[in-house]
Amino acid sequence: MFDPDLLADKHILITGGGSGLGLDMTARFAELGATVSICGRTPEKLESAQKEILSRSKNGKVFTHAADIRDYEAVENMVANLESQGGLINGLVNNAAGNFLAASEDLSPNAFKAVVDIVLTGSFNCSKIVGSRLIEREEQGSILNIVTTYTQTGCAFVLPSACAKAGVEAMTNSLAYEWGTYGIRVNAIAPGPFPTEGAWSRLMPDEKSEQAYKSRIPSGRYGEKWELSNLAAFVISDLAPYMTGSTIPIDGAERLNAGQFNFIAQLAPRDQLKQMFQQMKSKSSK
Ligand code: HXC
């Protein structure tokens, strides 16, 4: 579907690009011709990710910079360093996240702050610094924020993440409007269940929970990394020039469990449910 040079004129910075979904998106962008830069807190992780990306794109241009995106000055230095190597950054994926399961009444102030600072402040720092450099140089760009499907509903036991990701979605819409005049598009993707080691080790307590979770997904399976990466490539590319201020869910319809009677789907096999509906129909029509 994609031209192999789709992203050839892009230098894309992917935060948290050293592992998980961020790494796969980065590798896909490089396959499609982008110069890519990744950042994270652990230099060794970035080095091994760089090797993996280059194994998928032999002639790819991949730059790394270890930094904590919570630190504004560190992000300024990082962006200047990466641009000195790969040219002006005209694509940004705010992907880095922090999350864990905890009862909200047990959260320490620092635990709340740790997640909000990575997700919300980190996304602000990167967007503000990359965006202002684009505006200064009168260049267009594309920002993609990775949020979640629970920005709209809230979510138990992940309060800091729910608050922070909802903030990032508000930032998506705010900047899309404000920076539309500069030709900077700002969109978000809301992935549902895409298991990665980083997320599942923090969010999936045991096998039983995993079964319960899987049964909530109407598509009957988890998402695969390539599915998210292709969507991300499309959204960040010039194939979607009129798309801005959009949040696109990709979740096998898992978020629609909010529907009041959806639980019935899990009560019995479908043929039994249909019989039950028939019985109810005949009773109610009398
Ligand atoms: C309660 C916890 C905790 C836990 C840490 N804390 N883990 N509290 N339950 N499981 C508390 C600590 O006690 C401390 O508070 C405070 O949080 C900061 O912890 P540190 O370890 O000092 O902070 P830091 O090294 O900055 O680590 C940040 C982190 C960590 C968020 C806590 O987990 C991290 O770096 N995560 C990055 C990767 C990640 O989380 N990936 C998953 C993203 S998945 P005190 O008071 O003791 O000082 C995702 C997908 C969402 O977002 C969608 C799913 C479907």
Image (cartoon, rainbow, N blue to C red):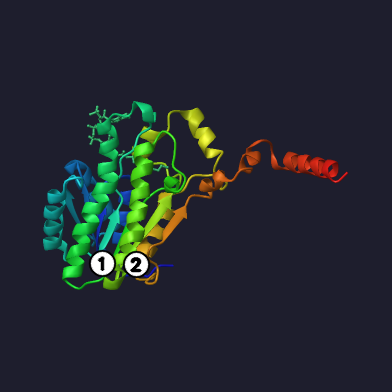
Front residue of 180 and 249 = 180
Residue located beneath label 2 in the image = 237
Where 98 sits versus 37, above or below?
A: above
Residues tagged 1 and 2 counted as in contact (Cβ below 8 A): yes
Above or below, comparing residue 40 to residue 145 in the picture: above
* Left or right of residue 279: residue 252: left
Please state if 6 lies on the left or on the right of 83 as rendered. right
Q: Residue at x 29, y 72 (%)?
A: 181
Which residue position is annotated with label 1? 10
Residue type pointed to by label 2: Ser
Confirm whether residue 30 shows in the render: yes
Q: Residue at x 29, y 56 (%)?
A: 93
Quadrant for residue 140, please give it.
Answer: bottom left
Q: Is residue 16 visible?
A: no
Sequence-wise, which precedes: disc 1 or disc 2?
1
Q: Position of residue 67 (x, y in %)?
A: 16, 46
